[in-house]
Image (spheres, coloured by chain):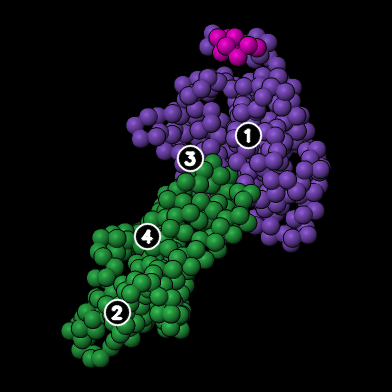
Chain colours: A purple, B green
Amino acid sequence: MSGVIEFRDVGKSFGKVEVLHDIDLAIEQKEVVVIVGPSGSGKSTLLRCINGLEIITSGELIVNGICLPRQRRQIREIRKEVGMVFQLFYLFPHMTALDNVAFGPRKVRGASRSEAKAIADDLLEKVGLSDRSSHYPAELSGGQQQRVAIARAMAVKPKIMLFDEPTSALDPELREEVLNVMTAVAREGITMVVVTHEMSFASKAGSRLLFMDDGRIAEDGDPEALLRSPSSDRLKDFLKHVGY
Amino acid sequence: MGFEFKYIVESIPALIEGAKLTWYITIIGITGGMVLGTVAGLLRLTGTRAVGGESYGFWRVLGVVGQKLAIMYIELIRGTPIIVQAMFIYFALPMLIEVSTGIKGVRFNALTAAIITIIINAGAYMAEIVRGAVESVNKGLIEAGMAMGISRLQLIANIIGPIAFKRAIPPLGNQFIISLKDTSLFIVIGVGELTRQGQEIMASNFRALEIWTAVAVCYLIMTSALALMLKFVEKRMQII
């Protein structure tokens, strides 16, 4: 059976700079794939190709049955099923926390105002922010903003969730609350692809670990096993650098 | 022969008539200019990520053609004086129509020509204001919207628009005031706006000091009103 996300010999260049080479990768439903690697190794680009924020320049990428770049006109159909959480949250600054979360159900799923509000209330409670629903993003801490951003992405009930370094912009004491929410999402059985430097998340919640280096997938395996006994020197080096 | 208030008092009814006309031209002109400027400014950004990335098929062709037209329009209007534009619309356009189609006597009245001139002129400057404001919206916010799978129209209406509008208020205010004062140029095509009223009173009583002082105060009141209105709108959008 083919995966819900499938990279077939994928390459991506920005102008003359090739950032991804020969990526072959199949991700099955309910997998929690954690991608680690040094900066500039292509992790974020790989993630952003999945929902078409970047368009691959060679090979094929099949997401939820739609093949990029051939069917790129249907990119919105992919995006409706793929939620994304960004490093810098990017909550809509002119909307309250509640309106941010209700936005997807209203505009993407066509829910009524009251249905969308119910969904948003429910999700804000799940991420522990019921008491902040009428606050604007500027009035929330980084950790709170990121939890709202996760709720916003989950509100349309996506099949896949992408996380692009969701804790990198947060103070250490705020990371825990975001990681806890992510772990809870992983337990719900949603397919997740997570770019992060949080090795603890990889071993605790991840079902698969990818190590990227220089635009290639250098290691691919069970998180516990890879972290306990890294097989390559590159990975050993990297783990030492991130202090694991 | 000092400063005599009675000349000002005498001139008030005529000046108010002129001011009403000035206000009327300005309000219709800048409203139309905002619509035209928003369309031209967005068209100028066709295909860029600032407005949600590229489109396909028919919309792509329309966008590219629209973009070229928008650039030509903006450069043409910004590159010529408004008084020449007013003269062209009022005097030259009827001749152009006659020469090119053979239809005689198509002519706007002076007031219509004045309003069209303000719409077209303000629209070009506002297009650049809109472009700048839209380009200043954080790309991450636009990507966050795109990543949700909403349409381009939804993206512009719900995310880019409200954020860009707030940024655009100060430069738009500038343009509103410039357009209001530009209406004084329509004296050349015989519109009875405030400056022309002042000119006519002055020509009959030669009280230049009193009349031009009164005219200046009238303009100041109107520009202040515009500025206050914008302050109010800006205050209401504080949270962004």
Q: Quadrant of residue B121?
A: bottom left
Would you say residue B53 is visible in this rendering?
no
Mark 4 vs mark 3: give the one in front: 4
* Residue at 23% from the left image edge and 91% from the top image edge: B104
Mark 4 vs mark 1: give the one in front: 4
Mark 1 crowd level (few <14, some 14–19, many ≥20, 10 Å Cα): many
Query: Element under label 2?
Result: loop
Q: Residue B7 placed where, x, y %?
A: 40, 80
Query: Element under label 4?
Result: helix
Mark 2 crowd level (few <14, some 14–19, many ≥20, 10 Å Cα): few
Q: Residue B169 placed where, x, y %?
A: 50, 56
**What residue would you read off at disc 2?**
B206
Q: Is residue B72 above or below residue A208?
A: below
Question: Chief secondary structure of the magenta span?
Answer: helix
**What residue would you read off at disc 1?**
A163
Under mark 2, the amino acid is: Phe
**What residue would you read off at disc 4?**
B125
Mark 4 crowd level (few <14, some 14–19, many ≥20, 10 Å Cα): many
Query: Element under label 1?
Result: strand
Under mark 3, the amino acid is: Glu
Whether A243 is among the magenta residues is yes
Whether B109 is among the magenta residues is no
Would you say residue B238 is visible in this rendering?
yes
What is the span of residues highlighted in magenta in the rendered image?
Answer: A235-244
Q: Residue furthest front?
A: B1
Decide which of tag 4 and tag 2 comes sooner along the chain.
Answer: 4
Spatial CA span between label 4 and label 2: 38 Å
Spatial CA span between label 4 and label 3: 33 Å
Spatial CA span between label 2 and label 3: 71 Å
Q: Residue A67 placed where, x, y %?
A: 52, 45
Spatial CA span between label 1 and label 2: 76 Å
State the mark number for residue A54: 3
